[in-house]
Amino acid sequence: GWPVTMVTLETTASDFYALHPAVERVGLGVSGNSSGIWEATRNNLHRIRMIRRAIQASRPEVVISFMVPTTIITLLAARMPRVPVIVSERMDPIRSPLPRIWNTLRRMTYPLAHAVVVQTPEAQSWADGFLRGEAVHVIPNPVSTSLRANATDMSNGVNLGEGWRHVVAVGRLDSQKGFDLLLRAFAVCRENRPGWKLTILGDGEERERLEALTTQLGIGADVQMPGTV
């Protein structure tokens, strides 16, 4: 029942799946890397202007911003319309330190947020170090224990097969996701537990390294990485 506008720095051309038709989708097309500090400053000022325009156009009651440094840029953009902003830290800020300039800006801008959402009590302790306690909220990632999957529900070359037990992991193939640890753990468990297969859904820059690791561990026949589905 809420009117929702989803705004991203990317264009809509990068969308992988369709949203609910009631959601207004806005792609700003202002993402990308910068070659130096002056270009980065100019590009981020442009992003602030574009986000501010998107906020003004949608006239929201509240803005929810995900992932640093977009959260910082959004807080700066929302100052002029004076719209309440909730920011959500999707990574452990202790284990994922920012460059000095972004860390300084985060400490300067996060006190402007109406609320700051973190995922763990440890991250809450970090946030309590520079934010008022009532503004910090812990909301862990949801996990449903009632999901069921059928082989007919899978696509894009995913073959669950008959008579096998399966471990399924989902995420981009990035070093921070730790799929190399999963592969090593699966290799150890598989020695005493035949009849299991591992499927990793997602894609990314670590694909070649992970595929080489499956060969090195001798588990290639029982691991499949079909990509993004």
Image (cartoon, rainbow, N blue to C red):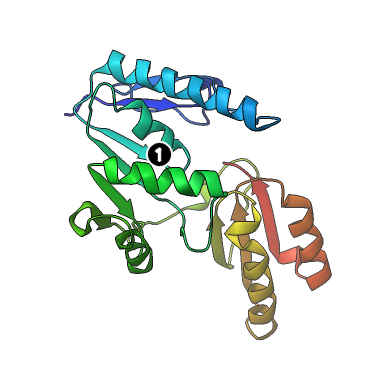
Secondary structure category for the residue under label 1? helix
Kindly identify the residue that appears in the image at 61 percent across and 63 percent down.
Answer: 178
Kindly identify the residue that appears in the image at 59 percent across and 62 percent down.
Answer: 162
Q: Where is residue 36 shown, x and y percent of the image?
A: 69, 31
Q: Which residue is mark 1?
A: 71
Q: Is residue 16 left or right of residue 199?
A: left
Closer to the camera, 17 or 163? 17
User: Can you tell which quarter of the image residue 195 is in?
Assistant: bottom right
Closer to the camera, 170 or 161? 170
Binning the other alpha carbons within 10 Å of mark 1 as few (below 14), some (14 to 19) or many (20 upward) gives many
Q: Where is residue 51 shown, x and y percent of the image?
A: 40, 22
Residue type, mark 1 in image: Thr
Q: Is residue 111 left or right of residue 220?
A: left
Kindly identify the residue that appears in the image at 36 percent across and 20 percent down.
Answer: 52
Using the rendered image of the protein, determine whether residue 153 is visible from the camera's viewpoint. Answer: no
The quadrant in which the C terminus is found is top right
Kindly identify the residue that appears in the image at 53 percent across and 44 percent down.
Answer: 101
Q: Where is residue 28 shown, x and y percent of the image?
A: 48, 19
Closer to the camera, 224 or 10? 10
Residue 16 in the image: above or below residue 96 = above
Using the rendered image of the protein, determine whether residue 97 is visible from the camera's viewpoint. Answer: yes
Q: How many marks?
A: 1
User: Can you tell which quarter of the image residue 25 is in?
Assistant: top left
User: Can you tell which quarter of the image residue 1 is in?
Assistant: top left
Closer to the camera, 25 or 63? 63
Q: Where is residue 181 shown, x and y percent of the image?
A: 64, 70
Q: Is residue 169 left or right of residue 221?
A: left
Residue 190 in the image: above or below residue 173 = below
In the image, farthest residue toward the bottom: 192
